[in-house]
Image (cartoon, grey):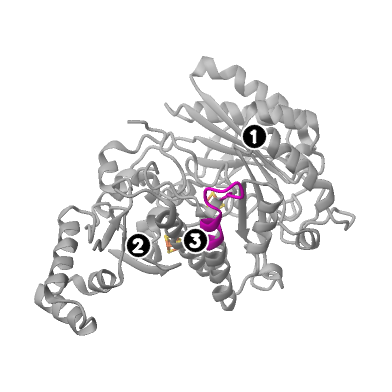
Amino acid sequence: MIHQFKNNGYNIVLDVESGAIHVVDEITYDLIGIFEGNSKEFVVKNIQDKYPEVSKEDIEEIYDEVQGLVDDDVLFTPDVYEERIEDFSKNRPVVVKALCLSIAHDCNFACKYCFADEGTYNGQPRELMSYEVGKQALDFLIHNSGNRKNLEVDFFGGEPTMNWQVVKDLVAYGRSQEKKYDKNFRFTLTTNGLLLNDEMMEFCNKEMGNVVMSIDGRKCINDKMRPTINGKGTYDIILPKFKKFAESRHQKRYYVRGTFTRNNLDFSKDILSLADEGFKEISMEPVVAPPTADYALKEEDLPQLFEEYDSLAREMVKRHGTDKEFNFFHFMIDLEGGPCVYKRLSGCGSGTEYLVVTPKGTLYPCHQFDGTKGFEMGDVWKGVTNIDLQTEFKGCNVYAKPECKKCFARFYCSGGCQANAYNFSGSVTGNYKIGCELQKKRIECAIMIKAATGSEE
Amino acid sequence: MKHIKTLNTKRLQKTVKTGGCGECQTSCQSACKTSCTVGNQSCEHKN
Ligand code: SF4
Ligand code: SF4
């Protein structure tokens, strides 16, 4: 299948199954739109009627060029993946390669939209993970990772810096096991910045492959949604630290990450505000909230949100190649070196290759399911014991989801977030409509940016 | 006049044979932990 769209003056044709992207002129765009299933005579005649000023020969020439793309398997490429999907989803042995350690079920912020209920995750008691539980989790990972060499461990919470000593001790333990088992740990950390100090930054710069610093953009927006537990604004405390942290990492291997809600539908301003503060790696995520929350995004907000993404993309094209250039996580797309189709079709990996560990050592499919009743998968001592649930997650590929199967974005999105799907549709193979619409828009913008700045074959 | 400009992209069909090593990053993990996106990830398999 193909997907055609216009953005920022570019006419773009995406050949979904091959991943080829063609930037074409108006006539070619229209011609491709009626190409499939019609005869050459019909197509040429139709385009001639629409563009009387263009000669028949010229139109035939375009037709032949388009036919050439089809012959080269870069247009209307058939789907050769669906029939093999079982081989790389259901029938694949499960290896665990990534763990999210909920190192602190506690937080020193009181963010209004926190999916983790200020670190307690569905009202579980506030508690910190002990070194013993964390160590057992790393052992569990090592022994269940088969011959995967790269193992990912994310320190998450709540707020992981509230349990800093354990973070450091676990990193040391992980490193001590690498040689013996021929593994390579990639540690990452997400922080709200309140406790962040020089010693932590130095440690992270040495040990953490990526750090995520949470901040929502403009001061007024950040302070409204991300207050301390005493209700105070946090922007002025965290901004200087994050700036220093980002600089100390040479503006690489980090993200400042915010959340936008119905309170800032003009979120592109928040992204630009972070960019103007000098950050180069920026992410801004749509909030996921129960529809009853006053800050939840609504379907009627979509046109405005689309326009925000479009204007952000246009601004990024303008800044490209200047010292004001920055990366926006959701517009980053690796067209030349991106992952193979297996990766693209097999979903996010929650419940199979990716699991979360609670402070008590319980395993859940991912951080978004932490504490969700019925989603306990086992623990770090016995391993995964809920095989039915594992099997259910294993089957979560794009072809198992009716909406994804026909979606042009499926090779970039890989089927969306299982947790969102579950929370909004009651099934992990369902869909969260607003999330999908935004995802599709972001992918269009990302492709447009490539069309405007990228290299040609 | 040039009607079609094709961007440099990896042909997905070809990766059916070469892909599947599984060494690449878990989508949701180290980036931002909500919206899973794979398009921006890189393949670890250098060949
Ligand atoms: S955007 Fe939605 S429908 Fe499309 S692949 Fe992603 S989850 Fe599936
Ligand atoms: S995409 Fe959703 S279900 Fe998958 S790991 Fe991320 S939060 Fe969990």
Rendered residue at 33%/52% (across/down): B7
Res. A74 mark: none
Marks 2/1: CA–CA distance: 41 Å
Q: Is residue B3 left or right of residue A286?
A: left
Marks 2/3: CA–CA distance: 19 Å
The three-letter amino acid code for the residue at tag 1 is His
Callout in the foreground (2, 3) = 3
Say which residue label 2 marks: A405
Q: Earlier in the sequence, mark 2 or mark 3?
A: 2
Say which residue label 3 marks: A442
Structural crowding at the residue carrying mark 2, measured as other residues with C-alpha within 10 Å and reported as few (<14), some (14–19) or many (≥20): some
Label 3 beta carbon less than 8 Å to ligand 1: no
Asked which quadrant contains residue A186, the reply is top right
In the picture shown, does residue A61 fall above or below A383? below
Q: Earlier in the sequence, mark 1 or mark 3?
A: 1
Label 1 beta carbon less than 8 Å to ligand 2: no
Q: Which residues are magenta?
A: A313-327
Q: On the rendered image, what quadrant is the N terminus of chain A found in?
A: bottom left
Callout in the foreground (2, 1) = 1
Q: Chain of mark 3?
A: A
Say which residue label 1 marks: A250
Q: Is residue A207 left or right of residue A195?
A: left
